[in-house]
Amino acid sequence: MLITRPTLEDVPTIMELFTETISDNFREEGIIDNHQSELVAEIISQWETLQQDFHTNGQENYFLIAKKEGKIVGTIAYGTPNTIIQQHLEGVAQLAIPEIKSVYILPKFQKQGIGSTLLKAILQILNDRQISAFCLDCGYRKSQSFWKKKLGEPTKILSDYWDINAHHMIWQRDTINSLSMI
């Protein structure tokens, strides 16, 4: 597996990955039929995040992609925390703590260590850049179990945020400690 920065030529394939993985997540959550506008908005949001990486040369958002046998199978990024994190974790914006975001692995490549490899790579970059802390949020139940295994219990749980028993979880962690746990 190769972890690398995306190129402009990768954008159409990355957009296909976003569309497939986000649609799969909505299907798994049982919300695909009633939340088409949110699904489209999430895909557009990921495209905008990726475009910011290219327009700022990784200064606003910094992406990595995972390639397996020459195929893009996953993404991860870090950048400015989203609105939910800023509203629910005090001091994140003022302390310039970045959010790890845009973690998407193609469904047929999940549970093969790709997410862990991408997480370790982005944490190493944060550490190399002397960024001592990060945050991350997740509303997908399937993904929440992954993050709990990697990062422990969330710092904050927004109960029934999306629906009854559909919580939103936010983690804030130390970079070096998290890197040593992966």
Image (cartoon, rainbow, N blue to C red):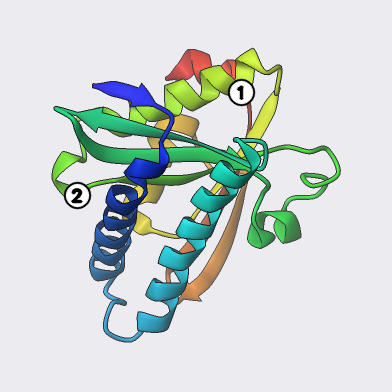
Splitting the image into 4 quarters, where does residue 97 fall?
Answer: top right
List the residue tagged with mark 2.
107
For this orientation, the residue located farthest to the front is 9
- Under mark 2, the amino acid is Pro
- Horizontal placement of 43 versus 124: left or right? left
Residue closest to the eye, 129 or 159: 129
Q: Is residue 146 visible?
A: no
| Label 1 crowd bin: few (<14), some (14–19), many (20+), radius 10 Å | many
List the residue tagged with mark 1.
126
- Which residue is painted at 59% across and 62% down in the image? 158
Whole-angstrom CA distance, mark 1 to mark 2, is 27 Å
- Horizontal placement of 96 versus 6: left or right? right
| Label 2 crowd bin: few (<14), some (14–19), many (20+), radius 10 Å | some
- Which residue is painted at 29% across and 21% down in the image? 2
**Upstream in the sequence, badge 1 or badge 2?**
2
- Which residue is painted at 30% across and 62% down in the image? 19
Residue closest to the eye, 140 or 33: 33
Q: Is residue 54 above or below residue 83?
A: above
